[in-house]
Image: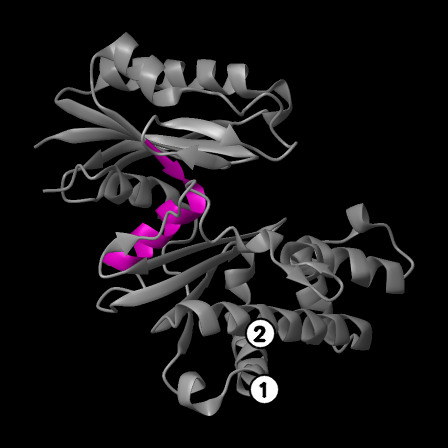
Amino acid sequence: MKRYISIDIGGTAIKYGIIGEDAKIMLKKSIPTEAGKGGPAILDKVIGIVNEMLVSHSEIAGICISTAGMVDTETGSIFYSAPLIPNYAGTQFKKILEEKFQIPCEVENDVNCAAMAEYYAGAAKGYHSMLMLTIGTGIGGAFIAGGKLLKGHTYSACEVGYMNMEEGTFEEIAATSALVARTAKRLHKTADAISGKWIFEQAQDGNEVCIEEIDRMCDILAKGISNICYVLNPEIVLLGGGISAQTDWLKPRIEMGMEKYLIPVIRKKTKLDFAKFKNQAGMIGAYYAAGFIG
């Protein structure tokens, strides 16, 4: 059976391992990203990972990479990245890895990869079209219809976190980081002293400020989701990222907002659900996005 090296580059950790041609993870490991060291250091880490996997495994037929940042999938290079990873733009994963190891390499944006995993094997399996949103420090988006990922003219389709809304961009006002900032201010704490998980725990214990801020975030998310649905009209909307652990709190609140912001003829045919694969989505989705399957 052919094996593939799958690498998921996130802001905190690089998850990597071996995935089989049945899209099953055979080995999974992790190392710190150390994003502050910049793009060249991450490239060195990836080269080291590939070396490690080639030494310990046979029949490696390709390398598939899921990464933060905007990706030119033709060249397999990063063309835009947030300041979290300095000097990441311009990193040419595909060219460098293929020249060094003489095996195919494909690179795709991490949210697109998560969407591919959910579409082919996860919570959106069996649906024709799906919108995926990952909610954490920022908000990422991806749209798939008929098995095809919408990439856009410059490979930046569904960068919905930058979508302008009344109080700021979508991610500035609806991401988990925004929830933490607003709640901390109202409770006279620093944002570093609390977390999204803490806020939900406090809400469960009846903290009215935390409940109000969760309700506010859900209403903003519902408005943003609804606006996107008017354009793309997906069968299903999936939410991923760390926030997806709070399904019981979030689903009824966001659905209530969608009832408010979507006209009934669209709302009744738009399902809301949460991602299945959690922290494995990047590795699995990188394989599907690479096109090695089949």
Circle 2 Cα neighbour tier, 10 Å, few/some/many (<14 / 14–19 / ≥20): many
Dominant SS type (magenta): helix
Locate residue 166 relative to residue 253 in the image: left or right. right
Kindly tell me whether residue 147 is visible in this rendering.
Answer: yes
Quick check: is 231 in the magenta stretch?
no
Q: Position of residue 200 (x, y in %)?
A: 67, 67
On screen, residue 270 versus residue 192, left or right, reads left
Q: Residue at x 34, y 26 (%)?
A: 75
- Residue closest to the far right: 188
Q: Quadrant of the C terminus?
A: top left
**Left or right: where 216 falls relative to 272:** right
Question: Is residue 67 visible in this depiction of the protein?
Answer: no
User: Nearest the camera: 1 or 271?
Assistant: 271
Q: Residue at x 67, y 58 (%)?
A: 196
Looking at the picture, how far across and down is residue 179, in whole percent? 72, 61
Dot 2 amino acid type: Ala
- CA gap, disc 1 and disc 2: 9 Å
Q: Eyeballing the image, is 255 above or below 193?
A: below
Which residue matches tag 2? 222
How far across and how far down the image is residue 283, in percent?
A: 34, 40
- Residue interval drawn in magenta: 107-120
Q: Position of residue 109 (x, y in %)?
A: 42, 40
What number is the disc on residue 260? 1
